Amino acid sequence: MRKPLVPELILSIRFFPTEGNPTDEVCLRLPEEMEKRLEALAMKTERSKQLHAREILEEHLGEYEMRLGYAEEAERILELYNKVPL
């Protein structure tokens, strides 16, 4: 396995429903520079890196889906997911 040219750090994000129990976790490998920027933002705002990462995803995921042409498919899957009893 090759080493990445840029050191990468792992950011773990937990997604919480309204009840407050974790339902899923995503681990992201971030380039060191991006992790430093996220860390600086977290320190300045006194909020967690995970919270900022989640807000960034919420704000830009729709744009990304549209750019890739997957927005309609993602909405259909979400509707199906919401119909499944937990």
Image (cartoon, helix red, strand yellow):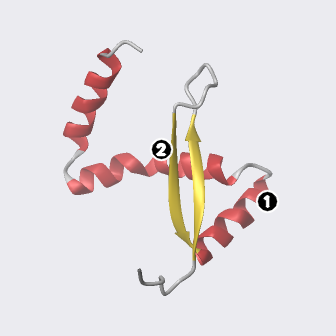
The reply, left or right, for residue 1 in relation to residue 48 is: left
In depth, the one of 7 and 52 nearer the eye is 7
The disc label shown at residue 71, or none: none
Residue carrying label 2? 58
User: Residue visible at 41% across and 80% down?
Assistant: 1
Amino acid found under the numbered disc labelled 1: Met
Amino acid found under the numbered disc labelled 2: Glu
Q: Image quarter for residue 68?
A: bottom left
Q: Position of residue 14 (x, y in %)?
A: 58, 41
Element marked by disc 1 = helix
User: Residue visible at 59% across and 58% down?
Assistant: 11
Element marked by disc 2 = helix
User: In the image as oriented, which residue stretches furthest toward the front?
Assistant: 1
Residue carrying label 1? 43
Q: Earlier in the sequence, mark 2 or mark 1?
A: 1
Q: Residues within 10 Å of mark 2 (few under 14, many from 20)?
A: few
Q: Residues within 10 Å of mark 1 (few under 14, many from 20)?
A: few
Q: Image quarter for residue 75?
A: top left
User: Residue visible at 29% across and 50% down?
Assistant: 65
The reply, left or right, for residue 48 in relation to residue 35 is: right
